Amino acid sequence: MTRWLVVGAGGMLGQDLCAALEAAGIAFTASRSADLDIRDHDACSRVVSEHGIIVNCAAYTAVDDAESHEAEAFALNAVGAANLARAAREHGARMVQVSTDYVFAGDADEPYAEDAPLAPRSAYGRTKAAGEWAVEAHCPESWIVRTAWLYGAGGGNFVKTMARLAGERETLSVVDDQRGQPTWTVDLADAIVRIVTSNAPFGVWHGTSSGETTWHGFTQEIFRQLGLDPARVEPTTTDAFPRPAPRPAYSVLGHEGWRMARLAPLPDWRESLAKALPSVVPSV
Ligand SMILES: NC(=O)c1ccc[n+]([C@@H]2O[C@H](COP(=O)([O-])OP(=O)(O)OC[C@H]3O[C@@H](n4cnc5c(N)ncnc54)[C@H](OP(=O)(O)O)[C@@H]3O)[C@@H](O)[C@H]2O)c1
């Protein structure tokens, strides 16, 4: 049986991917940064050998820090991805590269198609776009899976922050002028397993929930599902929260690839939030 290598296995997505592989009875090696530094090509080649599927969940994910540390972000998101892709090609393996909505400009008014032109506006987005190109160039037998607005039990994220703030403040102001698709890492892990095991076409896939909302709408739904009053969540604008990295106003990704391949897209974000809350915020 083909053995999988999960790179970045200790991260938020990596942990849920390992759980999904375990549940599916798929043999895999979980690799953390202490086991493999993906900036080291020779080490990548050594670790990749004897694996048929390489999933890269490792990344420099600090979007704001990347603005002042673009070289470090590039070393991981572009060079690291390239190292894994070269090693995958060398050993006849296939690769899944996890990418992001930040590769787009975020100024559209309809969902981004899988083949929409890239136009990143942030350092993080530029380095992830370079990672996509590197993987496509070095390992044509690869799937680029773009995701966005991720939350899960195994990492710090928006859902945990909002649940904590709900206990600390009477009202919260949350931006209502950025649209996207909140996505549970368990759904994304399942989507990655389905893409690979169904031998879906190589190329770009959009691994985000169905439906869309704003951060404000998302927070109101978190409150509602936690039995709290959603009126405590007030709308505000992006301008009220200046950040080093520009935020995309519109990050909704289209799911045509799923339809074309006759595979079920990821569930609606509200449905998944309801399933996720007991594990993501168990103490609430
Ligand atoms: N989080 C989001 O909202 C979001 C949105 C869109 C796309 N994505 C993409 O989704 C993927 C997973 O994100 P995530 O939130 O699960 O990330 P995460 O929790 O920040 O995990 C990233 C992982 O990368 C590992 N790593 C760091 N430096 C490394 C190195 N030199 N060599 C090998 N591994 C290294 C880290 O390991 P250590 O902890 O051991 O250092 C960590 O486990 C990434 O590709 C990210 O770009 C995330």
Image (cartoon, rainbow, N blue to C red):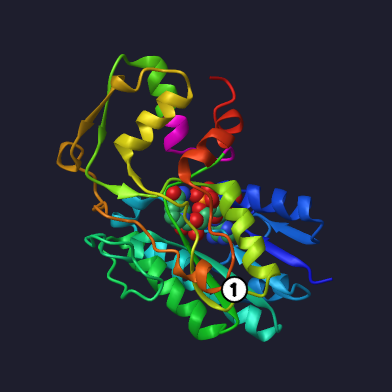
- The reply, left or right, for residue 160 in relation to residue 244 is right
Residue 282 image point, x, y percent? 59, 25
- In which quadrant of the rendered view does residue 55 lie? bottom right
Camera-side residue of 117 and 110: 110
Camera-side residue of 172 and 266: 266
How many labels were placed on the picture?
1
- Relative to residue 245, is residue 36 depicted above or below? below
Instruction: Determine the secondary structure under disc 1.
Output: helix
- Relative to residue 218, is residue 123 depicted above or below? below
Residue 272 image point, x, y percent? 54, 41
Give the residue type at disc 1. Answer: Leu
- The reply, left or right, for residue 244 in relation to residue 26 is left
> What residue sits 45% from the left and 72% below the top?
131
- For the N terminus, the image quarter is bottom right
Check disc 1 and report the residue beneath it.
84
- In which quadrant of the rendered view does residue 31 lie? bottom right
Q: For the residue carrying disc 1, how many other residues have a C-alpha within 10 Å: few (<14), some (14-19), or many (20+)?
A: many
Q: Confirm whether the magenta stretch covers residue 133.
A: no
- Relative to residue 135, is residue 27 depicted above or below? above
| Bounds of the magenta segment | 153-161
